[in-house]
Amino acid sequence: MRKEVLSTILPFLKEKYGNPSSLHSHGLQAREAIENARKKIAEILSCKAEEIIFTSGGTESINLAIKGVALANKEKGNHIITSKVEHPAVLDTCKYLEAHGCKVTYLPVDNYGTINLRDLESAITDKTILISIIYANNEIGTIQPIKEIGKIAKAHGILFHTDACQAAGSLNLNIQSLGVDLMTLNGSKVYGPKGSGILYKKHSIKLVPLIHGGGQEFGLRSGTENVPAIVGFAKALELAQSEKDREVSRLTKLRDFLISQLLKIPNTHLNGHPTDRLPNNVNVRFDNIEGEGILLHLNERGIFVSTGSACASKSLEPSHVLLALGISHEKAHGSIRFSLGKYTKMSDIKYLLRVLPPIITKLRSLSPLNEKC
Ligand SMILES: *Cc1c(COP(=O)(O)O)cnc(C)c1O
């Protein structure tokens, strides 16, 4: 968490402890903080304050958007369109709804991870109530054509939700120009508190809440508001917004330099789109090595990366996102995601580029690839 966010939050963990539903001055102080946060976020997204619902993060917002629309539109239809490269919060919510009478189309993607707009058009039926497509992919960074998807949804009178958790630091969040009806954002991806997030919901849309009780958040999310998380999220988003243009151009240069240098290592490939990708995402595939091996060696040198596969979590299945790109199981296992951030400098990239090639050479010279992970 960045220090400006921490210092914004601290008073609300200490002396400003009021329950925002209380009518005494401590309560009113907390209420005012929440409503100011809501206004600030609404300004950034170019929407109305009443269209912002505070939640416990990306996962909850996604659940509220998808289940909330499905439950509120039972008479209209039961068909949802999403993609094969969504975050598990979307995929597992859709799987759950399939077990409860919904039909879901999982759109395929091309080799870069982009959906095809013609596939989207032809998946639409008279029962389609919702399209949910990730704005930018958390594993491979590929950015989807959100405005075009929004136009198609609108032309067919279908609601459009986008999971924008990865977008806040670098992409356009203007609701009016994006043409989305629902949008999920979270705080932990912009140096805000974990367990913070919002769902933007166009005022005219009806949702059935997931959490019932005291009626907070316009009746859509009951329970005493998490005031520190709310003010922290607003601060984090505000700072991310004000630094966005500068950060995008700085990180894009670092990203492209890193990609170009990594691809000089023999038998190395870029996962995801070469240009329509998040400025902070580099996902690379090294043939004939296990990603976990690279991860552990880099960890020892103070470099913290992610593998594209879920091997570490007991499952032998590689990432569903990499498989959707048409990459084989075997090759997907050799993928590594490097995430750049606010604190990443060129000297860090150069350090990585010094440390990594010998690790790759060593791992390739060791035991042959164990395909079973
Ligand atoms: C992190 C993330 C989520 C989940 O958000 P939480 O705040 O961890 O619940 C969902 N979608 C995407 C694209 C993400 O990057």
Image (cartoon, grey):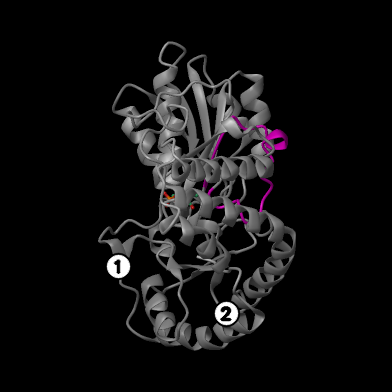
* Residue 39 shown in magenta: no
**Whether residue 174 is situated above or below residue 358 in the rendered picture:** above
Where is residue 342 drawn, in percent x and y? 61, 69
Residue at the far top: name it. 75
Q: How far across and down, in percent of the image, does residue 139 sit?
A: 49, 57
The residue positioned farthest toward the front in the image shown: 24
Question: For mark 2, does the 10 Å Cα neighbourhood hold few (<14), some (14 to 19), or many (20 or more) residues?
Answer: some
Q: Label 1 neighbourhood size at 10 Å, few (<14), some (14-19), many (20+)?
A: some
Q: Residue at x 48, y 46 (%)?
A: 197
Question: Is residue 253 toward the left or the right of residue 101 in the image?
Answer: right
How far apart, in angstroms, are the residues tagged by discs 1 and 2? 23 Å
The residue singled out by tag 2 in the image is 265
Rendering coords of residue 9 (x, y %): 49, 58
Q: Secondary structure at mark 1?
A: loop
Quadrant where the C terminus lies? bottom left
Task: Residue type at mark 1: give it.
Answer: Cys
Up-down: is 160 above or below 339?
above
The residue tagged 1 is 373
Q: What amino acid does circle 2 point to?
A: Ile
User: Is residue 14 shown left or right of residue 282?
Assistant: left
Q: Which mark is residue 348?
A: none
Q: Quadrant of residue 74?
A: top left
x 35%, y 74%: residue: 369
Q: Which residues are magenta?
A: 165-185
Q: Assess whether residue 173 is covered by the magenta stretch.
A: yes
Q: Quadrant of residue 99?
A: top left
Name the main secondary structure of what is drawn in magenta: loop
Is 206 in front, or is 157? Answer: 206
Q: Give the percent coordinates (x, y) of residue 81.
A: 49, 30
Residue in front for this viewpoint, 106 or 349: 349
Q: Is residue 105 visible?
A: no
Q: Secondary structure at mark 2?
A: loop
